[in-house]
Structures are given as C-alpha cells and as structure tokens.
Image (cartoon, helix red, strand yellow):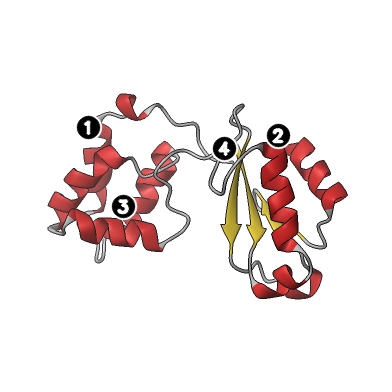
C-alpha cells in the first residue's frame, strides 16, 4: 500500500527541503533522498527536482537519468494497490502478454495507469522469480503464480478495481 499523497500543488517546498537536508551528510545521498521523497509523498514530486539537483550539484538531466533508470520511482502517486504483471520471457511463453492485454483492456488502462477510483495501478515487471509458475503477478507485497483470467478477476476484485 502506498501512502496517500497530496496534490502536487500542495507539496510544500519546506517539506522537500527538510528531506533533502536530512540526507546530505551521508555518502551517496541521491538514492536515499529519492526513497525518502517517495516514502513521504508516494512519488518523487517533479517540484523537488530543481532543489535536489542544486543541493547535490548535478544537472536535472542527470537526476532524470537516475529516476528513470529505477522503475520503482514514480512521477505521480500510485493507486492504493500496485499490480505488477511479469513481462519476462518465461511468463510470456505461458501467456502473460495476452493476460496483460486482457487485464489492461478490462480496466481501460495503459501500463502505469491507475483506475479512476484510485484503487489500482498496473505496471510491468521483468521477472518475479516464479519462472516455473508463470504467468506471475505481484499485488502489493504478494507474489502469485499461474495466474489465469479467473485468478486475475479475483485479484482485481480484492483490490477493489
């Protein structure tokens, strides 16, 4: 479950500054700062980019490169639950591509989309370690193998999607 997050316009610059300042004395503070921002707001607010880049003496392009490299950093808050559908070859071989297409179609979403009620965000993931039990998904902290349409329907209903 992700923390609820205020709208971007309500995220106070002083909260962002305090998070940045709290991590500046550690070695390699960028990732800890990004994790702290995401823990506090449910995402890495774009409004934090300029002050973070300035505090660490890096360019905004360098910052963007780090944020976009790590898939779990978000530019916008996720839903209350996150459903990750495995896109790796082993799961594709047993139907994850079709399962993903049907799931996204049913929800009316694209990858990284969130349902209108804020219940669920759907994301791709490239291996959950259940290669022998594909297609695999992860919902919240729970990994589920051998997901078919019926099992996916049950997972979506549990998530309130």
Q: Image quadrant for the N terminus?
A: top right
* Residue at image mark 3: 33
Q: Position of residue 125 (x, y in %)?
A: 59, 61
Q: Residues within 10 Å of mark 1 (few under 14, many from 20)?
A: few
* Residue at image mark 1: 14
Distance between the alpha carbons at the discs numbered 3 and 2: 32 Å
Q: Residue furthest top?
A: 10
Q: Nearer the viewer, mark 1 or mark 4?
A: 4
- Of the numbered discs 1 and 3, the one sitting upstream in the chain is 1
Q: Nearer the viewer, mark 3 or mark 2?
A: 2
Q: Residue at x 65, y 52 (%)?
A: 141
- Of the numbered discs 1 and 2, the one sitting upstream in the chain is 1
The quadrant in which residue 88 appears is bottom right
> In the figure, is residue 102 to the left or right of 70?
right
Q: Secondary structure at mark 3?
A: helix
Q: Position of residue 149 (x, y in %)?
A: 83, 50
Q: Residue at x 63, y 69 (%)?
A: 127
* Residue at image mark 4: 114
Q: Residue at x 40, y 37 (%)?
A: 41
Q: Do labels 2 and 4 touch, CB within 8 Å?
A: no
Residue 44 can be seen, yes or no: yes
* Residue at image mark 2: 161
């Amino acid at each position: 479950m992700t923390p609820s997050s205020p709208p971007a316009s309500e995220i106070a610059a002083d909260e962002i500054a305090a998070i940045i300042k709290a991590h500046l004395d550690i070695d390699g503070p960028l990732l800890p700062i990004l994790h702290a921002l995401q823990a506090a707001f449910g995402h890495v607010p774009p409004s934090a980019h300029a002050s973070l880049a300035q505090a660490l003496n890096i360019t905004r392009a360098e910052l963007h490169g780090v944020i976009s490299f790590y898939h779990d950093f978000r530019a916008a808050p996720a839903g209350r639950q996150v459903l990750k559908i495995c896109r790796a070859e082993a799961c594709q071989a047993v139907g994850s591509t079709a399962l993903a297409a049907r799931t996204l179609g049913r929800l009316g979403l694209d990858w990284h989309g969130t349902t209108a009620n804020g219940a669920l965000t759907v994301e791709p993931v490239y291996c959950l370690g259940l290669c022998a039990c594909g297609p695999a998904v992860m919902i919240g902290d729970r990994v589920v193998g051998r997901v078919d349409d019926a099992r996916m329907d049950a997972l979506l209903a549990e998530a309130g999607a």
